[in-house]
Image: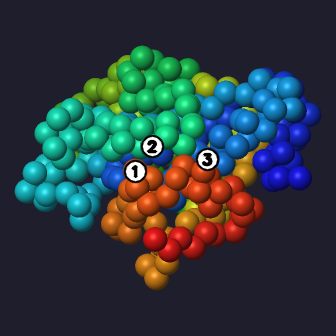
Amino acid sequence: MHWADVVAEKLLEDGKKHIISSGITPSGPIHLGSMREILTADAIVRAVNDKGGDAELIYIADNADPLRKVYPFLDSEIYEKYVGMPLAEIPAPDGNGSYDHYFLKPFFESLETVGVFPKVVENYKSYKKGDFAEATKSFIDNRDETRNILEKISGRQLPKKWFPWTFLNNDGTLTDGEVLDVNWPNVTFLNKNGEKVTNNMAKGEGKLPWRLDWPAKWKILNVTFEAFGKDHATKGGSYDTGKELSEIILESKTPLDLVYEWIHLKGKGAMHSSSGIVISAEEMLTMAPPEVIRWIVMKPQPNRHIDFDP
């Protein structure tokens, strides 16, 4: 029996209808390693549906995340000023449209070629529409318990002035700050320049930190299964904290999970967009047919890393 069938049978024990989630932060070229995640999720969807279930694949584009640095493939003279801003608000490298769509568009075209057609959810739009408001209010109302969970499970002490929100500064960047006043849905903070700035959290002025953002998405989208890389699965990592926050603060069930290993580029190491060690999904499709890409990903168990030699 294929590993996807084993997962599907576990899911069907809990019910017929399932939401299978996958996603990425579109900070750079979306590579073959990222393709492993969504092909893994797609295999589960197919297996559930083949067994009489009703599974839907959603793909979350984390485009509310900030540009963390000027990556090697970017012009520093252009992009230095955009560091810290949400990816959805930054111009594309070719000047046409937004930064996030510049990298998402060719990836989605590649997915169509390999026969994957997910429902796409853009996190940036979800925040602006207020989809995160209820979960955010739960974290705000229970911020002491939220903090205790994060510290207990991660083993790391948070700053004394920690607050469960990443603020939107008056220059458009996402930042930390000192909270001066909270009157839902507004929070007023003091930025590093000593200026008072107010965010409307219900309208997505700012965003939840990653460890809170992830379980919030599970609840908002009713996710029942998600595959993710081993970096999130370490003891005390974001899945461990997400599980506790989901069940205690959000009063929601944690999705069934599957941890997958990286795809390594032979002789260079694991693929990462930020390091430039990548073969993009669209480049891969110029080398091999879609069936071969699926075979490369589907044949080994997800917990086995894949050495890819172009």
225 horizontally vs 70: left or right: right
Task: Kindly identify the residue that appears in the image at 73 percent across and 47 percent down.
Answer: 257
Q: For the residues marked 2 and 1, what is the alpha-carbon distance in whole angstroms?
A: 6 Å
- At which x and y percent is residue 154? 62, 59
- At which x and y percent is residue 128? 38, 21
- Look at the image and tell me whether residue 10 can be seen: yes
Task: Kindly identify the residue that appears in the image at 28 percent across and 40 percent down.
Answer: 102
In this view, the mark in front (2 or 3) = 2
Residue 50, compared with residue 241, is above or below; it is above
Residue 158, compared with residue 256, is above or below; it is below
Q: Earlier in the sequence, mark 1 or mark 3?
A: 3
159 horizontally vs 54: left or right: left
- At which x and y percent is residue 203? 38, 19
Q: Which residue is mark 1?
A: 282
Residue lying furthest left: 77
Q: Which residue is mark 2?
A: 110
